[in-house]
Image: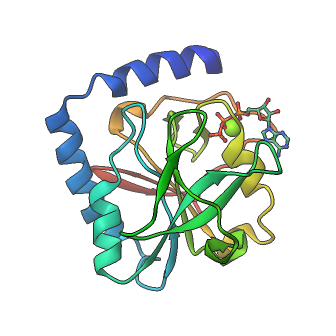
Amino acid sequence: MQTRAEIRKHIRLSRQQLSLQQQQVAAEKLVEQVLLLPQFNTSQHIALYLTNDGELDTSLLIQALWQLNKQVYLPVMHPFAPGYLLFVAYNKNTLLQANKFGILEPYPECQHIIPLAKLDIVFTPLVAFDNKGNRLGMGGGFYDRTLSQLPNKHATELVGLAHSCQQVAALPTESWDIPLNTIITPDKIWQFS
Ligand SMILES: Nc1ncnc2c1ncn2[C@@H]1O[C@H](COP(=O)(O)OP(=O)(O)OP(=O)(O)O)[C@@H](O)[C@H]1O
Ligand SMILES: [Mg+2]
């Protein structure tokens, strides 16, 4: 089995090599898949991410959610608790600033922060996944740390978004890795619990 570092390197390279057209098609299919998600209609507060490093493009999905009057939130690196994420409301007028990784984030103003447990769905980026719902991220542990604080994991749907090329046969996991309930690729919804 490859190490986590080897898998990250190899899969990041494959997704960075997807063409703009492949990314565009994937973004359109993602919207269709998310609308088919059984939990979608009853979900109002939805965390997403802005695309980086060849990740599945969420821009069309965010537009679709705004049109459906869903509340969208983005992860922000916690200013006082290193390694943790806050989720902050995101709409058409939200001002964004780049964090230390160059990823755009809203300003973490108190009145725009949602408590983690109030999120109905958290869509996470990922580097690699397997057919058991295991997730390998970029290696910061940000989602693992933050999601470990959920009081009742079953009340929040944890959904990984990925290109099909990010699937691996089996991921080496660690005790702190938080598995996903669902993984969505442009062609398929995988539900694990
Ligand atoms: N709940 C936690 N408490 C403390 N440290 C943690 C926790 N979860 C993960 N970490 C630390 O974070 C580091 C990176 O974890 P890991 O390799 O699983 O990241 P990742 O899942 O790829 O990243 P991310 O969650 O940001 O997508 C590890 O060294 C691990 O010890
Ligand atoms: Mg992890």
- Colour pattern: rainbow
Residues 98 and 14: in front is: 98
Residue 168, percent from left and from top? 48, 29
**Is residue 91 in view?**
yes
Instruction: Give the left or right position of residue 129, taking residue 189 as reference.
Output: right
- Quarter for ligand 2? top right
- Quarter of the image where one finds residue 37: bottom left
In the image, residue 190 lies at what x, y percent?
44, 55
Apparent side of residue 148 relative to residue 158 in the rendered image (left or right): right
Q: Quadrant of the C terminus?
A: bottom right
Along the line of sight, the residue nearer the viewer: 142 or 94: 94
At 50% from the left and 29% from the top, the residue drawn is 169
- The reply, left or right, for residue 39 in relation to residue 152 is left
Q: Residue at x 37, y 84 (%)?
A: 69
* Left or right relative to 130: residue 21: left
Horizontal and vertical percent for residue 42? 47, 86
Specify the quadrant that holds the N terminus: top right
- Residue ID at (57%, 47%): 133
